[in-house]
Each structure stands twice: as C-alpha cells, then as structure tokens.
C-alpha cells in the first residue's frame, strides 16, 4: 500500500500574556487499529517546523506524511479497505517537539512535548478521501518524547 496523508493541527492560545515557542520536531500519522490485536498501520512521518504562538492568537501546524510499499496482512487489508469505502477510517496523529514559555520578559527553557490526537475520522463529504474530519480528542503530554 502507498499512502500520502496531510495533517493539520490548529491551536488557540487564549492567554493574554503567555506566549509559546515551539522548536522543530516530527509528526507521524497512522491508521488507528482495533483493540483486537490488529494494531495501527504506520503511514509515515515528516519534519515539523518550529513556530511562535503569540498571546490571544491561533496557530496551525501542517505536514505531509508519506509511506511507500507498506505490507499488510489479509485481515488488516480487508479492515482498511472496508473502512475506507464507508468513510470510517480512523487516524492517529503524533507530533513530538519542544516548547518554551514566555511571560513578559521571562522565558523558560525548551521542554519535550508530545501532542497525541486519536480518533480522527475521514470526512463523510470527501468521496476521494482527500480530507479528514476534526479530531475528537487531543492530549498534550509534557516531558514525554521518543526521539
């Protein structure tokens, strides 16, 4: 299987005085598996550029992950094909980076950050599979990065 997946994560900073700066990192995308042992199917990774997230602003991180020649067993391939046809394919997105905080003139050092988004589903209105719907839940984990 060959796959190219574009991921875009949007974040809102509601703080009036707190700004964040994110260092370069990497983003990974996988097809979410079932709890029956089939597991996730990795769809590749891509570098993610660092950026500054100013107070009271919206920031977006986007990357395109590519996988070529992914080998699937028959059960997993049937599950992926069935979910793709019914527009119910679920995705898992993980972004590992470093984040620093600035409050006025005070700045912290950069600490490891993992952004974990589960259960993103293909949008029902995308017959060619080019768009995915919003993620249902995302977690921000500090000090947890696997490089």
Image (cartoon, grey):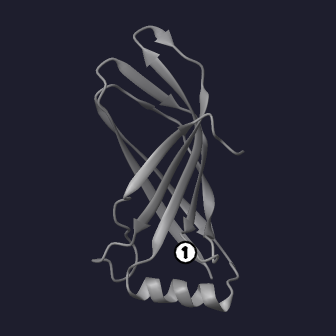
Quadrant for residue 88, please give it. bottom left
For the N terminus, the image quarter is: bottom right
* Residue 41, placed above or below residue 138: below
Q: Identify the residue shown where x is 53% and y is 83%.
A: 80
Quadrant for residue 86, please give it. bottom left
* Residue 28, placed above or below residue 15: below
Task: Say whether residue 129 is left or right of residue 115.
Answer: left
Of 77 and 3, which appears nearest the observer?
A: 77
Q: Identify the residue shown where x is 62% and y is 89%.
A: 75
Farthest residue, direction top: 105
* Residue 111, placed above or below residue 83: above
Q: Identify the residue shown where x is 61% and y is 79%.
A: 2
Quadrant for residue 12, please give it. top left
Farthest residue, direction front: 36
Of 90 and 61, which appears nearest the observer?
A: 90
Measured as percent of width and height from the top left, residue 82 is found at: 47, 89
Task: Say whether residue 83 is left or right of residue 32.
Answer: left
Under circle 1, the secondary element is loop
Q: Residues within 10 Å of mark 1 (few under 14, many from 20)?
A: few
Measured as percent of width and height from the top left, residue 22 is found at: 52, 33
**Residue under pointer 1:** 34
């Amino acid at each position: 299987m060959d796959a190219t997946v574009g991921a875009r994560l949007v974040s809102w900073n509601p703080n009036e005085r707190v700004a964040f700066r994110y260092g370069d990192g990497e983003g990974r995308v996988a097809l979410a598996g079932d709890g029956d042992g089939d597991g996730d199917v990795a769809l590749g990774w891509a570098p993610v550029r660092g950026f500054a997230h100013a107070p009271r602003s919206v920031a977006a991180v986007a990357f395109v992950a590519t996988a070529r020649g992914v080998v699937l067993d028959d059960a997993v391939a049937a599950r992926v094909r069935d979910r793709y046809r019914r527009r119910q394919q679920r995705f898992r997105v993980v972004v590992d980076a470093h984040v620093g905080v600035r409050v006025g003139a005070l700045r912290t050092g950069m600490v490891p950050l993992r952004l974990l988004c589960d259960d993103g589903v293909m949008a029902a209105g995308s017959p060619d599979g080019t768009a995915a719907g919003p993620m249902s839940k995302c977690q921000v984990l500090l000090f947890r990065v696997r490089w």
